Image (cartoon, rainbow, N blue to C red):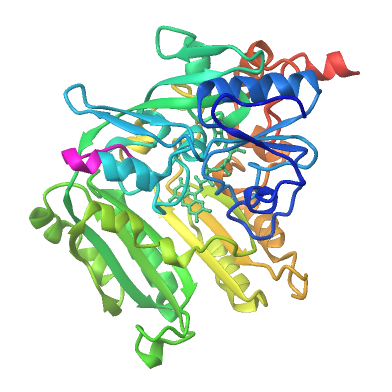
């Protein structure tokens, strides 16, 4: 290949780093790009896009490489790897942070917390901010400050034509609308500006473990609590099987439990009183609720989700968790033969739900719970239960909220994408036509350019 990047590297299949660089978080993904452009500057990104265009190759974009479906890497196309572009600059006076497109949540939190500020992100610090923000972003600040995408003030992007553009509420306003929830469909985001808020440095972290046998009672009590929970409380429930880890008492080894993790984003002392009911949803097994640095809370779950774990997963939004839903979930968990399953219910309320469905591309604003189901799938296909995740999705779909899924936690599938964007899909498809008419950016929850089918038939 005659091309050279100004600052980064082009990694071809015979390069010693190729094997390493094509890997993503999910160990199940095993794809072979024609070339990996390890970009270190915006000019490098432009070169990568123009290269792909000239050679008529599809593009995949890697931010933090954490999408379950491994959409950051593609077979036979150009993988644009932004992981070296991870600079973060805080403008504390204006309450903004500028973040390059390959930064992780840890990169962002580390800088913003120097100033006692934060922008809403997710709950695992190694996740990439770009994929998270472009597809939504639910973290412990969602009740108070909304989704990560709601906090985007502007983006700089390289479009499919290789142009560098800036989009905000005044410039390219429709593109700005589309990137807030529309995923990586519209180009490569080289940097974002996010709104900052006063958070921490110490926060009240909610962390309670309950017995799995009390699951229904815990969920019912959580639902009731969330009916009038203040915006400061954001909370996730997870059903997991504990590992036989030495730090745990022996009677908990391999035990299935229900955990409640979350945060009170106001004054921790006041929070103690407010979160009390969450510590008494049933009889707790362990209660580690307490004050800790925000940055420590943001990293707390990292060891639970190591890179390279082969995982399948799905997601659905719910407005009601009626008995049928809970019965399907509990029976499904009990019957599963996968080596590990994790079922999460994230409670949604406050600012995350206050934004209107049409204000940004992210349409789902009325659901009360986000269900995420993940399972470890042996790479050698040795489990009898490889279809468990898809079967759970099918069983739960009729009860879900307008058949919508969290696209950041589900494999790309046309009908799921359309269900989720709902009325916003048509507008997204028209914006896609304008900025990526040949669907170069197709390794994502793809929004088809409005004239694409016509043009290709
Ligand atoms: C362990 C784990 C924990 C998670 N926790 C949470 C959580 O707490 N809250 C939550 O909301 N979600 C969570 N997620 C889901 C997460 O939001 C998505 O997986 C998200 O896509 C990750 O972003 P990434 O940049 O790491 O992904 P990547 O795999 O790098 O990218 C995913 C897609 O995003 C697009 N993209 C990425 N970077 C760019 C860019 N710079 N420009 C244009 N397009 C880009 C591309 O289409 C790409 O295919 C979690 C996922 C994992 C695996």
Give the quadrant of residue 378.
Answer: bottom right
Farthest residue in the bottom direction? 250
Residue at far left of view: 269
**191 or 445: nearer the eye?**
191
Residue toward you, 345 or 100:
100
Q: Where, quadrant-wise, is the N terminus in this rendering?
A: top right
Q: Is residue 270 above or below residue 118?
A: below
> Going by the image, does 141 lie left or right of 311?
left
Quadrant of image for the C terminus:
top right
The total of numbered circles placed on residues is: 0
**Residue 65: x percent and y percent?**
56, 46
| Residue 167 horizontal side relative to residue 259, left or right | right
Left-right relation of 90 to 98: left
Of 244 and 213, nearer the camera is: 244
Residue at screen point 33% across, 54% down: 298
Q: Position of residue 236 (x, y in %)?
A: 38, 57
Which residue is at the far right?
457
Look at the image and tell me whether residue 239 can be seen.
yes
Task: Answer whether residue 401 is visible to the viewer in this image.
Answer: no
The image shows residue 17, relative to residue 289, as above or below, that is above
Q: Is residue 364 left or right of residue 404?
A: left
Quadrant housing residue 268: bottom left
Residue 208 shown in magenta = no
Q: Which range of residues does the magenta coloring cover?
A: 112-120
Give the percent coordinates (x, y) of residue 185: 62, 27
Q: Residue at x 27, y 40 (%)?
A: 111
Percent x, y of residue 347: 39, 52
Q: Quadrant of residue 351?
A: top left
Nearer-the-camera pick, 382 or 206: 382
């Amino acid at each position: 290949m005659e091309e050279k990047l100004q600052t980064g590297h082009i990694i071809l299949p015979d390069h010693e780093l190729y094997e390493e660089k094509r890997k993503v978080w999910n160990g199940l993904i095993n794809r072979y790009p024609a070339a990996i452009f390890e970009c270190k500057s915006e000019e490098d990104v432009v070169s990568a896009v123009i290269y792909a265009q000239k050679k008529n190759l599809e593009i995949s974009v890697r931010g933090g490489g954490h999408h379950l479906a491994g959409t950051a890497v593609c077979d036979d196309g150009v993988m644009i790897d932004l992981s070296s572009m991870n600079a973060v600059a805080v403008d504390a006076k204006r309450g903004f942070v500028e973040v390059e497109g390959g930064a992780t949540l840890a990169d962002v939190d580390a800088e913003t917390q120097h100033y006692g500020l934060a922008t809403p992100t997710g709950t695992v610090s190694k996740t990439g901010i770009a994929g998270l923000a472009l597809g939504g972003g639910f973290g412990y600040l969602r009740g108070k400050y909304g989704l990560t995408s709601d906090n985007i003030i502007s983006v700089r992007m390289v479009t499919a034509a290789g142009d560098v553009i800036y989009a905000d509420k005044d410039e390219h306003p429709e593109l700005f609308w589309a990137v807030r929830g529309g995923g990586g469909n519209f180009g490569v985001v080289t940097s974002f500006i996010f709104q900052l808020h006063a958070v921490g440095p110490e926060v009240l972290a909610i962390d309670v473990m309950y017995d799995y046998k009390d699951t229904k009672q815990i969920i019912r009590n959580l639902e009731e609590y969330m009916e009038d929970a203040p915006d400061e409380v954001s909370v996730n429930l997870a059903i997991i099987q504990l590992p036989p880890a030495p730090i745990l008492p022996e009677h908990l080894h391999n035990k299935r439990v229900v955990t409640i993790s979350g945060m009170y984003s106001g004054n921790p002392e006041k929070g103690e009183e407010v979160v009390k009911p969450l510590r008494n949803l049933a009889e707790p097994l362990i209660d580690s609720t307490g004050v800790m640095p925000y940055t420590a809370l943001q990293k707390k779950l990292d060891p639970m989700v190591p890179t390279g774990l082969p995982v399948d997963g799905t997601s659905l939004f719910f407005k009601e968790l009626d008995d049928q839903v809970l019965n399907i979930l509990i029976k499904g968990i009990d019957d599963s033969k996968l080596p590990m399953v994790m079922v999460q219910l994230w409670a949604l309320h406050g600012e995350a739900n206050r934004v209107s469905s049409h204000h940004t591309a992210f349409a789902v604003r009325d659901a009360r719970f986000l269900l995420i189901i993940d399972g470890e799938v042996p790479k050698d296909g040795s489990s009898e239960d490889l279809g468990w995740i898809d079967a759970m999705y099918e069983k739960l779909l009729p009860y879900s909220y307008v058949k919508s899924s969290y696209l950041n936690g589900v494999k790309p599938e046309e009908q799921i994408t359309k269900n989720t964007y709902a009325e916003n899909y048509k507008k997204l498809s028209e914006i896609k036509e304008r900025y990526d008419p040949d669907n170069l950016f197709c390794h994502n929850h793809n929004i088809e350019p409005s004239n694409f089918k016509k043009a290709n038939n």
